[in-house]
Image: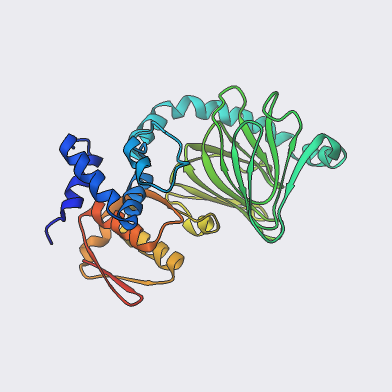
Amino acid sequence: MQAQQEWEIWLEQYLNGTADERTVQQLKDWTSASKENNQLFLTFVRSYKMAVPAWIKEVSAEQTWPELAERIRQHEAAKTKKNGALIALRWAAAAAVAASFLFFIFRWIEGNRDEYLVYTTTDAPQQITLPDSSHVQLNVRSQIKINKGFGKKNRSVLQEGQAFYDVTKNQQLPFEIHTAHAVTTVVGTSFDLSAYEENPEERLSVVTGIVNYQPANTTVNSTLVRAGNSLVYAYNTPQLTTRAVIANQQLYWTGKLVFENQPLQSIIPALQNYYHVTIAVKNAALLSKSFTGSFENESLQNVLNTICFTLNIKYQQKGNIYQLY
């Protein structure tokens, strides 16, 4: 294994909380030395869900980053696990009631269009901010409807097509998404839900938090889907299948890649499909190394630098082929 470069040592100390003032200054100087260094540093910060340090604003072009006081993903996951059981019971009860009225709601909405705000896309995705400050990225050929009292007495959404949600937390008003075949209920989380009418299945991928998925078919039980997991509901069968990994291909349209304690063996195919490259591994033992992190609209080089730094491995590029070692 090759020796670490100086910036890697500074970054490692910064990420694990052992960096002193001199090390932070050295990292700051390295970051401000070039646009490439600055972008690489921001990639690490984004991947680990860390707060953006104040000094990075002096050299970063990304001035609009929110000042989040988040810890890295592992700390956030531990907190979610601790409170998950109680919240899950509440969500399951709310989703069960919502599912029983699913088709009535569909018919009632069609007869009361004036009471609803409608967002529709055709050939391009659209970014939407709802009245409760939740964010929705609506894919092509998709539609959501909300009532004009959304965020006050309820947070119910009627969805057709595909959308990525980043839901603002509100324990008193669960966030409900009604599709043609299910009700999805959350309190505050982020996830992608695909429910195109022409597809024989609905697909759910959860990035953060916990989501309760309640099929309208009463013979299929509701299912809790946690961060880093995904679900496929074939409603004609009906059959519901969950997987302990994110369905990254479902998120490609958003520009996101999410890995929750996944081995390189499953990460590499996702990177190859997303970036249209070939990634080889010299030592098969590396394939069992696991990585947790997320990326959004990042270059392959920045993604590989982050993963390789975390796993203490290297890579070489020859044309369109990347080799890890």
- Tell me: residue 100, above or below residue 258: above
Q: Position of residue 103 (x, y in %)?
A: 77, 41
Front residue of 94/240: it is 94
Question: Toward which corner of the image does residue 91 lie, by quadrant?
Answer: top right
Q: Position of residue 132 (x, y in %)?
A: 63, 31
Front residue of 121/142: it is 121
Q: Is residue 246 left or right of residue 41?
A: right
- Tell me: residue 210, above or below residue 255: above
Residue that appears at 20% across and 51% down? 7
All told, the count of numbered labels is 0
Q: Position of residue 225 (x, y in %)?
A: 50, 41
Q: Quadrant of the N terminus?
A: bottom left
- Tell me: residue 256, above or below residue 100: below
Query: How is colour applied across the structure in the image?
Result: rainbow
- Tell me: residue 35, above or below residue 229: below
Q: Position of residue 272 (x, y in %)?
A: 40, 68
Can residue 296 be seen by looking at this rendering? yes
Front residue of 283/255: it is 255
Residue that appears at 70% across and 23% down? 153
Front residue of 14/270: it is 14
Can residue 260 be seen by looking at this rendering? no
Residue that appears at 45% across and 64% down? 274
Q: Is residue 311 left or right of residue 70?
A: left
Residue that appears at 11% across and 58% down? 3
Q: Quadrant of the C terminus?
A: bottom left
